[in-house]
């Protein structure tokens, strides 16, 4: 028997699952998930992510049971697991989706490839995003490839699948004894059932307000789709989402709502745009895309890092966002960017530990988006205009009445009016009235915002002049690429330099 092993990774669903569809059309199928302790101990992974995956696996078991199959969940090393399967079943073919993971999973995949090679096992890897590996294989631009991929039909399963079971017992996920150092009380629940409920509420109701409501931390939690963790662990496929969004957009008459759906669809394109960048430059996890930026790498300051990590920088908007993130495992794009800006430009911290810490707190941690974004928001990725966020102005614009800040910083509960934006300026009398004492108070900012920005801007300008690094407007390029989607069937004649970087 040639056993078709479907190795589930960040693709915890049965619908539009290319690997499962191809395997089940070929022969008897064994579905496997390997819980890898080495992965879950990395500085960019966390218990909150594991809990989400655990719930998604329970849901996947139910999906497979409905098809007459089962998911065998084991713990350990993937190569050792495959070795056991080969000893037990003889001939194997391995099927999985491609993964744009961190360096640990990249090395793990290389070990699996070596094992397959030396054991005569064929490993089929299927794309699950509009990303090409290696990029040399791609015909036409990234843009053309993306639209062609997203308009293909979804992977269909045959009506009957010959499922095989393995005699080793599966791990029981219903009982979980893991401890969380940083509990995430309002984490989104994992699993496809939840993914579909979130998708329905977004496309039928919440998406109307997407345009114009995704920047403020007050409105973003309901105006954003909140689909990111479901995409990160593949509870829903990106193709399903793109196709459903397109269908709803076509039926929507309300022009404001259509505009919102168009803004949302752009983000789905960005998902792959950034992931493709990471696929081609996976060293971005550790090294800057603009190599000269390494020369400006600041010394690590443990006191500032700890203050930023736990929401005690003295800038209310930054601290409120960090505390919110601890509690929810999610925050909106603008506030993620502000957190990176505060840590790297304002506090002068190196971007790598900042990236790892945020990755750990994000339930939706997706290396292909995360590292390119952190690099972009800290000036490492391109020579574009520096995006330095002023936390006082962000608070004035996005939380003018201090509702968000007061909710997340109890120390500011009794601070009123404009003092909420700069509480360190309050006279002592007002500090006492706010209930502050030696044990209960809100700290002053660790650095002078204006001064640290003057320094970092001057240092970057000097570096750019020294190496003749020309600014590039990536945003303009991204907008142009997406806006020309209607030309997707015609061959692009435009200058595609930006995307041919991949
Ligand atoms: C420093 C930083 C780190 C980030 N790290 C991650 C991460 O680890 N995982 C992650 O999924 N997103 C990350 N993002 C992108 C973005 O903030 C999140 O995708 C978004 O906030 C998730 O919420 P949502 O699903 O409700 O978003 P929506 O606005 O509803 O967007 C829908 C989907 O589009 C994609 N998307 C949205 N914005 C972007 C973007 N700017 N770039 C690329 N794709 C995008 C995501 O897949 C998202 O789920 C990061 C952004 C920054 C600034």
Image (cartoon, rainbow, N blue to C red):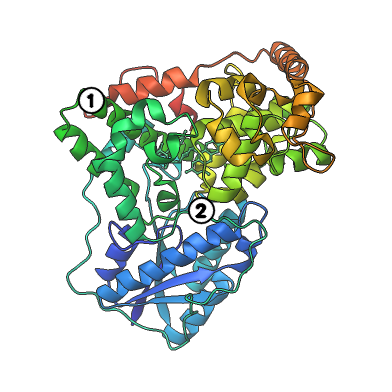
Residue nearer the viewer, 417 or 119: 417
* Residue depicted at x 47% and y 40%: 275
Quarter of the image containing the N terminus? bottom left
Q: Judge from the rendering whether residue 113 lies leftward or rightward of residue 246; answer left or right.
A: right
Q: Judge from the rendering whether residue 184 lies leftward or rightward of residue 142; answer left or right.
A: right
Measuring from the top left, give residue 322's x and y in whole percent: 62, 40
* Residue depicted at x 40% and y 42%: 131
On screen, residue 80 above or below 147: below
CB of mark 2 near ligand 1 (< 8 Å)? no
Kindly identify which numbered label has been placed on residue 486: 1
Which image quarter: residue 426? top right
SS of the residue under disc 2: loop
* Residue depicted at x 54% and y 34%: 404
Query: Do callouts 2 and 1 mark residues in contact (Cβ within 8 Å)?
Result: no
**Residue under numbered circle 2:** 186
State the residue lying farthest toward the bottom.
167
Measuring from the top left, give residue 214's x and y in whole percent: 42, 31
On screen, residue 283 above or below 155: above
Measuring from the top left, give residue 167's x and y in whole percent: 43, 89
* Other residues around mark 1 within 10 Å, as few (<14) / some (14–19) / many (≥20): few
* Residue depicted at x 35% and y 54%: 195
């Amino acid at each position: 028997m040639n056993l078709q092993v479907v190795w589930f990774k960040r693709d915890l669903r049965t619908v539009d699952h290319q690997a499962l569809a191809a395997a089940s059309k070929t022969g008897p199928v064994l579905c496997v998930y390997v819980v890898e302790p080495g992965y879950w101990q990395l500085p960019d992974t966390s218990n909150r992510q594991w809990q989400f995956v655990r719930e998604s696996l329970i849901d996947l078991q139910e999906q497979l049971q409905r098809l007459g199959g089962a998911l065998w969940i084991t713990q350990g090393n993937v190569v050792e697991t495959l070795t056991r399967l080969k000893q037990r079943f003889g001939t194997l073919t391995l099927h999985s989706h491609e993964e744009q993971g961190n360096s640990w999973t990249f090395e793990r995949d290389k070990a699996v490839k070596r094992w397959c090679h030396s054991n005569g096992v064929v490993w089929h890897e299927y794309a699950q995003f509009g990303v090409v590996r290696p990029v040399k294989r791609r015909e036409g631009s990234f843009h053309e490839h993306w639209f062609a991929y997203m308009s293909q039909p979804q992977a269909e399963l045959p009506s009957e699948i010959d499922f095989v079971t393995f005699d080793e017992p599966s791990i029981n996920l219903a009982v979980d004894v893991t401890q969380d150092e940083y509990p995430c009380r309002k984490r989104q629940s994992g699993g496809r059932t939840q993914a579909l409920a979130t998708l329905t509420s977004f496309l039928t109701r919440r998406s109307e307000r997407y345009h114009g409501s995704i920047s403020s931390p007050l409105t973003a939690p309901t105006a954003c789709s909140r689909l990111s963790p479901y995409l990160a662990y593949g509870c829903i496929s990106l193709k399903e989402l793109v196709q459903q969004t397109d269908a709803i957009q076509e039926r929507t008459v309300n022009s404001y709502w259509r505009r919102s759906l168009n803004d949302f669809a752009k983000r789905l394109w960005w998902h792959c745009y950034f992931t493709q960048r990471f696929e081609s430059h996976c060293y971005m996890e550790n090294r800057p895309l603009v190599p000269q930026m390494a020369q400006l790498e600041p010394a690590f300051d443990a006191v500032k890092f700890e203050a930023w990590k736990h929401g005690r920088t003295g800038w209310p908007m930054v601290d409120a966002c960090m505390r919110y993130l601890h509690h929810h495992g999610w925050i909106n794009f603008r506030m993620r960017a502000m957190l990176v800006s505060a840590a790297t430009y304002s506090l002068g911290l190196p971007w790598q530990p900042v990236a790892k810490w945020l990755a750990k707190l994000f339930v939706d941690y997706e290396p292909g988006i995360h590292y390119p974004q952190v690099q972009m928001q800290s000036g490492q990725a391109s020579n574009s205009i520096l995006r330095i966020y002023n936390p006082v102005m962000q608070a004035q614009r996005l939380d003018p009445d201090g509702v968000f800040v007061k909710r997340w910083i109890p120390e500011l509960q009794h601070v009123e009016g404009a003092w909420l934006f700069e509480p360190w300026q309050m006279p002592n009398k007002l500090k006492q009235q706010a209930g502050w004492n030696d044990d209960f108070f809100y700290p002053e900012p660790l650095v002078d915002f204006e001064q640290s920005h003057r320094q970092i801007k001057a240092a970057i300008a000097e570096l750019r002049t020294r190496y003749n690094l020309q600014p590039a407007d990536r945003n303009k390029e991204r907008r142009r690429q997406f806006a020309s989607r209607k030309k997707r069937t015609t061959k692009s004649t435009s200058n595609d330099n930006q995307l041919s970087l991949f």
